[in-house]
Each structure stands twice: as C-alpha cells, then as structure tokens.
Image (spheres, rainbow, N blue to C red):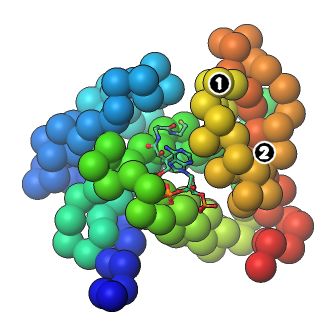
C-alpha cells in the first residue's frame, strides 16, 4: 500500500486560480458555502482575507479562505475560517483533515492567535463532527441561520 500524499497549502495565484474555480462539490453540498470564484473575488478586496489552495502532492484538491478578524468586535488574534472545501473526487481520503490541521498550524504560528471561529450549515453533519474532533465547540446559531463554532487556541491541542 502506498502512503497518502502529503498535503500542503499554497497561495492562490494567477497560475492556479482557474483550476481552483473548477473544483467541484457534490450537488447537495453546494448550499454549504459560496463558490470559490466568489471567495477569490472577496479576498481581492480585503487584505485580511487569505486564500489557500490545498494540494495533495502536486495535485490540486481543495480550497480554503481564512480571515484575520479586524479587532473591532473581536479581540486581537481572532481568526475565522470562512471557506473550506475538498473537491468531490478527493473527499473521504483524509485530505480535509490534513488540510485543516495545516491551516490551524499556520494560524498557531502567529503568537497572538487566540481563537478560531467558523460556521457551518446546521444540517451538515459531516462538518459538525469533523470540526468537533478538532476541539471546535458550537456556540449557537447566527443571524444567517448558521451554527457558529469556536476553537480556543490557548487550550492545549488534543493529541
Ligand atoms: C468537509 C470536507 C472539507 C472534509 O474533507 P474530506 O477530505 O472529505 O475530509 P476527510 O477525508 O479528511 O474526512 C474528515 C472526516 O469527515 C468524515 N467524512 C468525510 N466525508 C464524509 C461523508 N460523506 N459521510 C460521512 N463522513 C464523512 C470522515 O469520516 C472523516 O472523519 P475521521 O477522520 O474521523 O475518519 C469535505 O467533505 C467538503 O468539502 N464538504 C463540502 C463543503 C463543506 O461542507 N465544507 C465545510 C463547511 S463550510
């Protein structure tokens, strides 16, 4: 049996953005998040929005966008993971788990990082148990009907 390819997060650039916009979800998952095109457009207007392409080896398999929250309503060091998807052809291979771990490692490299927020559609059972396994705790439904969850980085990570 061959080992799973290593997962890396790379910037979205002029060389890979079209491939990122071509990544696909299963039809029932499309309501779970905005399109990658929309996210890339958003990130072009807000310097605190950061996009990442997920690679397994040299193969593009997914997309993430995280946000350094602005410190107005939030404390310094609060982050949001606002988009996260693995292409439908590559789901269920452990790549999403490796990508989320890599992004949390990147966020933890900021000494000021203290909390990571995200939200998901309450009916998305995979997302609920998946994020919970990283230590995210549900905090309640927001005004858009999404479940908000938070990870406290000041707690020791679960081994
Ligand atoms: C959530 C998502 C990013 C996970 O990516 P992935 O590469 O499939 O994840 P993994 O293979 O690493 O699996 C992660 C966990 O989810 C579970 N899982 C993944 N797909 C599943 C499915 N269709 N049904 C049930 N469980 C599933 C796995 O069992 C795994 O749990 P484990 O590590 O304890 O075994 C991917 O399913 C996705 O893109 N979903 C649609 C978009 C979405 O919901 N984004 C998150 C909310 S914004």
Residue 103: x and y in percent read 53, 62
Residue that appears at 18% across and 38% down: 22
Q: Is mark 1 within 8 Å of ligand 1?
A: no
Q: Is 2 placed left or right of 74 in the picture?
A: left
| Residue 133 x, y percent position in the rendering | 73, 58
Given residues 10 and 70, the one toward you in this image is: 10
CA neighbours of label 2 inside 10 A, class few (<14), some (14 to 19), many (20+): many
Percent across and percent down for residue 30 are: 39, 24
The mark found on residue 153 in the picture is none
User: Picture coordinates of residue 152 (x, y %)?
Assistant: 83, 56
Q: Residue at x 20, y 72 (%)?
A: 58
Residue named by callout 1? 123
Side of 111 relative to 81 (left or right): right
> Dot 2 corresponds to which residue?
150
| Sequence-earlier tag: 2 or 1 | 1
Vertical placement of residue 9 versus 14, above or below: below
- Is residue 40 at all visible to an observer of this figure? no
């Amino acid at each position: 049996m061959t080992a799973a390819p290593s997962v890396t997060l790379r910037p979205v650039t002029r060389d890979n953005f079209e491939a990122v916009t071509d990544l696909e979800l299963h039809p029932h998952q499309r309501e779970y998040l905005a399109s990658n095109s929309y996210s890339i457009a958003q990130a072009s207007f807000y310097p605190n929005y950061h996009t990442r392409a997920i690679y397994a080896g040299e193969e593009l398999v997914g997309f993430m966008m995280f946000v350094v929250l602005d410190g107005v309503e939030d404390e310094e060091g609060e982050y949001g993971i606002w988009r996260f998807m693995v292409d439908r052809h590559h789901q269920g291979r452990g790549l999403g788990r490796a990508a989320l771990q890599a992004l949390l490692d990147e966020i933890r490299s900021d000494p000021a990082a203290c909390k990571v927020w995200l939200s998901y559609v309450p009916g998305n059972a995979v997302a609920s148990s998946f994020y919970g396994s990283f230590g995210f705790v549900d905090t309640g439904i927001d005004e858009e009907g999404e479940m908000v969850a938070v990870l406290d980085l000041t707690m020791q990570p679960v081994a």
